[in-house]
Amino acid sequence: MTNETWGQVREELIKRVGKNNYVTWIEPLKLALLNNGVARFEVPTIFFGDWVQRNYADHIRSQLASAGSPVERVEFAVGAPSMATAPAPVKATAKPSRARSVPVEDLPGAPLDARFTFDSFVVGKPNELAHAAARRVAEGGPVTFNPLFLYGGVGLGKTHLMHAIAHELHTRSPDLRVLYLSAEQFMYRFVQALRERQVMDFKELFRSVDVLMVDDVQFIAGKDSTQEEFFHTFNALVDQNKQIVISADRAPGEIKDLEERIKSRLQCGLVVDLHPTDYELRLGILQQKVDYYRSQYRGLVLADGVLEFLAHRITSNVRILEGALTRLFAFASLVGREITLELAQDCLADILRSSDRKLSIEEIQRKVAEHYNIRLSDMIGPKRLRNIARPRQVAMYLSKQLTPRSLPEIGRRFGGRDHTTIMHGVRKIEELMATDSQLSDDLQLLRRLLQG
């Protein structure tokens, strides 16, 4: 294959994987060998080769075939090979030479999704604070809160906001060293550095960035050596006044097996909760997606009420909501039918069944804590003050009424309380409802909020 042909393949890969992914993972590849059904490429590091093998090898193989050079296998090798003598391929089990040092600049972060920008993020009441904080960090300049800690359930927008911050920082300051990766990748690199005796290279990389972004930090909980290194990295960057952005599925104080000193550091900045989406936000997300799909599936008719129906029925996860709309448009295009409410019910029957409202105890606790203006940590903590104990009993009562959980299970979610304590709390609320009209109104409102 000539360089000209490889250039054509690369142009197609830009369209397939997106510009940001292409620049990070495809552009650095150098074709080293094409022979006997094998295409071999030079890569800067073992980690780089492993990542491209897992995520982009199939794309490369497909485009090579389209260009008239089909191959059975795509391999990646570290070093500077020639077309005549190719090195051994990179494998996950390969043991590199200890003398080789991996340059800091050759260790890119995880690829950014080109779709996850601020322009494509739909803002509503459940996420407006998180969005505003992310925007502030993305503006660059002096660090005002460090770290920014975003937390919430699956599909609420944490990763979207982190990618949006990175995209905006790259646009505003192309020379800024922004490193985004998951906590799992942080651990993988640290273990790899230990194995290859390149810990100093690892430390140099993570202490030389301008902005460090770590997704799903709860992953390192219970992993002692990784937590130790993360703690020192965190302190080193804060001392240099470098910005740190962290995400997790729960607040720092609620991450089990996370070292107390790390919890303390994470709580020193701005901790922001992304709440479950409300109806208006879900509808806004669907309306934005419809504008895109109408440009892709021209001529399709969307009947009134379909989006409202989906926003009402699919409440737990934005990814599931978006996936349902994707399936609906694709199905309607294939069968050549108008997208009606009846079509949506038939096409999405499985999603609608699984998305029937399933409340979690955590969601009930959060909503009750917000309503009574108390901290979630107090809700599950030991304090017995009346202004905390009564909301706690309300949350216990609603957990018993609105979830299928047993009393012992509910007790575990309320700080490990005994099931008899939960039973007492439930009975107390049942007794007060008959005489306390304000409490009855509170319960009615909370039920509406939780079941709407």
Image (cartoon, rainbow, N blue to C red):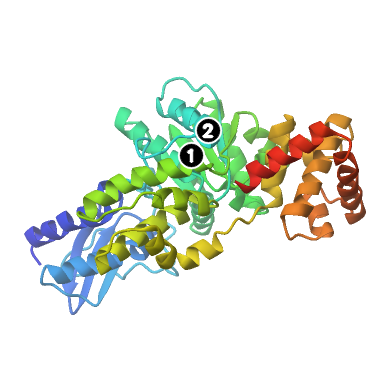
Residue farthest to the bottom, as pictured = 36
- The residue at 72%/43% (across/down) is 365
How far apart are the alpha carbons under marks 1 and 2?
Answer: 9 Å
- The residue at 53%/33% (across/down) is 125
Residue 251 located left or right of residue 388 = left
- The residue at 64%/41% (across/down) is 449
Q: Is residue 263 visible?
A: yes
Residue 121 located left or right of residue 444 = left
Count of all numbered marks drawn on residues in the image = 2
Q: Nearer the viewer, residue 366 or 246?
A: 366
Circles 1, 2 touching at the beta carbon (< 8 Å): yes
Q: Nearer the viewer, residue 212 or 364?
A: 364
Give the image location of residue 194, x and y in percent: 54, 55
Q: Amino acid at mark 2?
A: Lys
Residue neighbourhood size for the residue with mark 1, other residues' Cα within 10 Å, grouped as few (<14), some (14–19), many (≥20): some
Residue neighbourhood size for the residue with mark 2, other residues' Cα within 10 Å, grouped as few (<14), some (14–19), many (≥20): few
Marks 1 and 2, the one that precedes in the sequence: 2
Tag 2 residue: 125
Q: Amino acid at mark 1?
A: Glu
Q: Is residue 201 visible?
A: no
Give the image location of residue 189, x and y in percent: 49, 53
For numbered disc 2, what is the local secondary structure?
Answer: helix
Residue 301 versus residue 120 in the image, above or below: below
For numbered disc 1, what is the local secondary structure?
Answer: helix
Tag 1 residue: 280
Quadrant placement of the N terminus: bottom left
